[in-house]
Image (cartoon, rainbow, N blue to C red):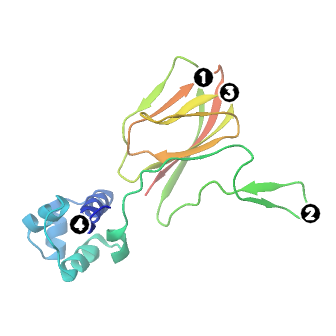
Amino acid sequence: MTQPIAIIAQSLIRERTLAGLSLAEVARRANIAKSTLSQLEAGNGNPSLETLWALCVALNIPFAKLLEPVSHQTQVIRRGEGMKVVAGEANYQAILLASCPPGARRDIYLLMAQPGADRLSQPHLVGSVEHIIVTQGRALVGLKDAPETLEPGDYICYPGDREHIFKALEPDTLALLVSEQG
């Protein structure tokens, strides 16, 4: 079980980085010592409720955001799987693959890849998430140390703030990439 201070430390670093603020600036805004904030981000100390509230105000985040553990999960949905909604008056079906969290930004790309041109990506901004749907061919996709083989229609979601790979396994592999930054 993760200790609350460890979750708070990860959340403080994540939210400060997402806000683009220095340690000194957040400490100034929260009216606490820079050394106190540094200790909290290192996972040390026992912060008071008042200190945590002041940090939330300084970072412009709800209090609950400090208590949310960082999620490093990979999700795969195979073609034909998932929660399906069917239209009553048309031959049309929709499967929700992922909803957009509040305040997130999404960029959409069409990927065109050939075997032998593996794309190893370094970690992106903290909190980044990538969603990929293979539309043609086959590809090895996901975290560098745990990629998944995807067929046409398969979906994967993984943390973009960790090393990840896209490796075409067939000629003319196509995929849709949605890059989400929190």
Give the quadrant of the C terminus: bottom left
Q: Earlier in the sequence, mark 4 or mark 2?
A: 4
Residue bearing mark 1: 169
* Amino acid type shown at disc 4: Ile
Q: Earlier in the sequence, mark 4 or mark 1?
A: 4
Residue bearing mark 3: 137
Give the label, 4 or 1, closer to the camera.
Answer: 4
| Residue beneath the point at 66% across and 23% down | 172
Res 152 visible: yes
Circles 1 and 2: CB atoms closer than 8 Å: no
Would you say 17 lies left or right of 93 here? Answer: left
- The CA distance from mark 3 to mark 2 is 32 Å
Give the label, 1 or 2, closer to the camera.
Answer: 1
Q: Secondary structure at mark 2?
A: loop
- The CA distance from mark 3 to mark 1 is 7 Å
Give the quadrant of the N terminus: bottom left
| Residue beneath the point at 49% across and 67% down | 102
The numbered mark at residue 5 is: 4
Residue bearing mark 2: 89
Res 62 visible: no
Circles 4 and 3: CB atoms closer than 8 Å: no
* Amino acid type shown at disc 1: Leu
Q: Secondary structure at mark 1?
A: loop
What is the tally of numbered marks visible in this picture? 4
Q: Earlier in the sequence, mark 3 or mark 1?
A: 3
**Rendered image quadrant of residue 153:** top right
* Amino acid type shown at disc 2: Glu
Give x and y (percent) for residue 151: 67, 33
- The CA distance from mark 4 to mark 1 is 43 Å
- The CA distance from mark 4 to mark 2 is 53 Å
- The CA distance from mark 4 to mark 3 is 45 Å
Q: Is residue 50 above or below residue 18?
A: below
